[in-house]
């Protein structure tokens, strides 16, 4: 009885072979989960702020565009290699984030939605690429713990930056907060790009 309960106890762990890979994909993974957290919490308010509209449809459209595009990207990228999916995600965020901010700054919801569409491609591709990078490095009995660790990291990135942004929005203009938030995500994407390119060099040398 006690052995059975011990075996069923939830475990979180990152096996040694997967640690460097998890660290390598962490910046881009954190960036996209933080983007998702911002959209599901503050984006409707931001759209209302920059357009002067109280319509809930614009905010819902932005959230739906991000998530639906992300889902479509997963389906499209499922036969691609993990590194390809990650690079697509990074390029999508580097292109999409400035477009989103331009739409917000100039009060153009169409531009903001176009940036959301671009970033949404990366939202799905980044999730798929990160999982495919780390999960094959764990043995079958270690995968549950590794997946749990990945999701703990992901949901912390989903919630904590958005909570901080919400607190800052009480003291500063929401558009200013969103601009700095987006700049932080853009910086994470650059770090992710550097790590992805650095990680490919040992593979090329082995090949």
Image (tube, grey):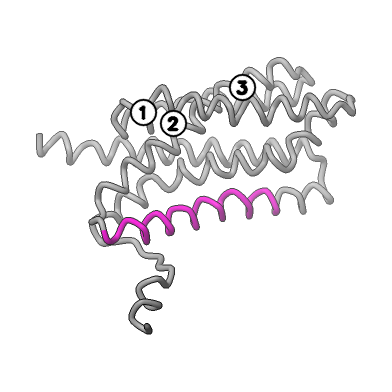
Nearest-to-viewer mark from 3 and 1: 1
Which numbered disc, 1 or 2, marks the residue closer to the eye? 1
Please determine whether, in this image, residue 54 is positioned above or below residue 6: above
- Residue appearing at x 68%, y 37% in the figure: 39
The quadrant holding residue 65 is: top right
Q: Position of residue 3 (x, y in %)?
A: 33, 81
Q: Residue at x 76, y 49 (%)?
A: 166
In the image: residue 14, left or right of residue 190: left
Q: How many marks?
A: 3
Check disc 3 and report the residue beneath it: 115
Q: Quadrant of the N terminus?
A: bottom left
Disc 2 versus disc 3: distance between alpha carbons?
16 Å
Q: Earlier in the sequence, mark 1 or mark 2?
A: 1
Work out which residue is located at the far front of the displayed protein and give it: 1
| Residue stretch rendered in magenta on the structure | 141-163
- Closer to the chain start, of discs 3 and 1, is 1
Q: Which mark is residue 78?
A: 1
């Amino acid at each position: 009885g006690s052995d059975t309960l011990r075996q069923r106890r939830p475990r979180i762990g990152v096996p040694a072979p997967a640690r460097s890979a998890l660290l390598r994909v962490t910046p881009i993974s954190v960036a996209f989960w933080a983007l998702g957290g911002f959209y599901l919490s503050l984006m409707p308010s931001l759209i209302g702020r920059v357009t002067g509209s109280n319509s809930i449809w614009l905010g819902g459209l932005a959230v739906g565009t991000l998530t639906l595009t992300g889902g479509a990207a997963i389906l499209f990228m499922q036969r691609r290699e993990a590194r390809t999916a990650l690079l697509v995600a990074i390029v999508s965020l580097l292109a999409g984030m400035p477009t989103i901010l331009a739409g917000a700054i100039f009060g153009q919801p169409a531009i903001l939605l176009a940036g959301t569409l671009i970033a949404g491609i990366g939202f799905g591709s980044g999730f798929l690429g990160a999982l495919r990078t780390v999960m094959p490095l764990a043995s079958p009995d270690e995968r549950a713990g590794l997946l749990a660790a990945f999701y703990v990291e992901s949901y912390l990135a989903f919630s904590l930056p958005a909570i901080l942004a919400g607190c800052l929005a009480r003291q500063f203009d929401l558009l200013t907060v969103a601009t700095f938030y987006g700049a932080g995500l853009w910086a994470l994407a650059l770090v992710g790009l550097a790590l992805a390119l650095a990680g490919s060099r040992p593979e090329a040398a082995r090949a």
